[in-house]
Image (cartoon, rainbow, N blue to C red):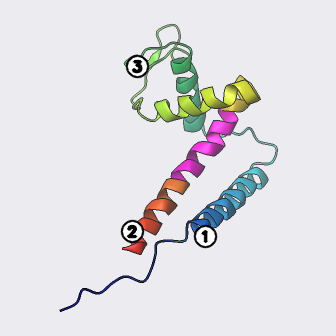
Amino acid sequence: MTNPTHSRSGPDWRLVLAVFAAATVILVVRTLIGRAGMPFFADTDDAMRMVMVRDFINGQGWYDLTAHRLNTPFGAEIHWSRLIDLPLAALVLAFTPVLGADLAMVAAGYAWPMLLLLALLWLSARLAWR
């Protein structure tokens, strides 16, 4: 018996990147049009997550999940994990020298979902290839 050989060489990564780029443009433009005149972090959870990221970057401890801006003067314990704060903080720190601190937060807010989309498309292409 002979083993069948696969004639396919692999997924077309240019197509995957083109789909990613198109989806990125569509989603960002849709967000900008849909939120015209509104602040970027219109959802309070999004804004609070970025406040926690900013506190983490400014030296708040990994295990200190107290939001000092809430329930003053005592602060409020936040139930979120810091695991999501780490990549967001890395993006903010990477964008800060180029964009400044405030725009770096907004850029990270756009970049993080798009990076998750890229990972999802890559994984989908790999699984579909099998």
Q: Which residue lies furthest to the left in this view?
A: 1
Neighbourhood count class around disc 3 (C-alpha, 10 Å): few under 14, some 14–19, many 20 upward: few
Q: Kindly identify the residue that appears in the image at 68 percent across and 26 percent down.
A: 96
Residues under labels 1 and 2: Cα distance?
15 Å
- The residue furthest bottom is 1
Q: How far apart are marks 1 and 3 (CA)?
A: 40 Å
Report, in whole angstroms, how far the alpha carbon at label 3 lies from the one at label 2.
35 Å
Label 1 neighbour load within 10 Å: few <14, some 14-19, many 20+: few
**Amino acid type, label 1:** Leu
Q: Nearer the viewer, residue 67 or 94?
A: 94
Q: In which quarter of the image is residue 23?
A: bottom right
First-in-chain label (1 vs 2): 1
The reply to whether residue 128 is in sight is: yes
Say which residue appears at 52% left-offset and 24% top-offset: 52
Q: Quadrant of residue 64?
A: top left
Q: Position of residue 85 (x, y in %)?
A: 48, 31
Foreground: 108 or 3?
Answer: 3
Residue at (44, 80) in percent of width and height: 8
Tell me the number on the disc at residue 127.
2
Q: Name the residue under label 1.
A: 15
Magenta highlight range: 105-117
Helix, strand or loop for the magenta stretch, by majority = helix
Q: What element carries label 3?
A: loop
- The residue located at (55%, 30%) in the rendering is 90
Q: Circle 3 is placed at which residue position?
A: 62
Q: Position of residue 65 (x, y in %)?
A: 42, 20
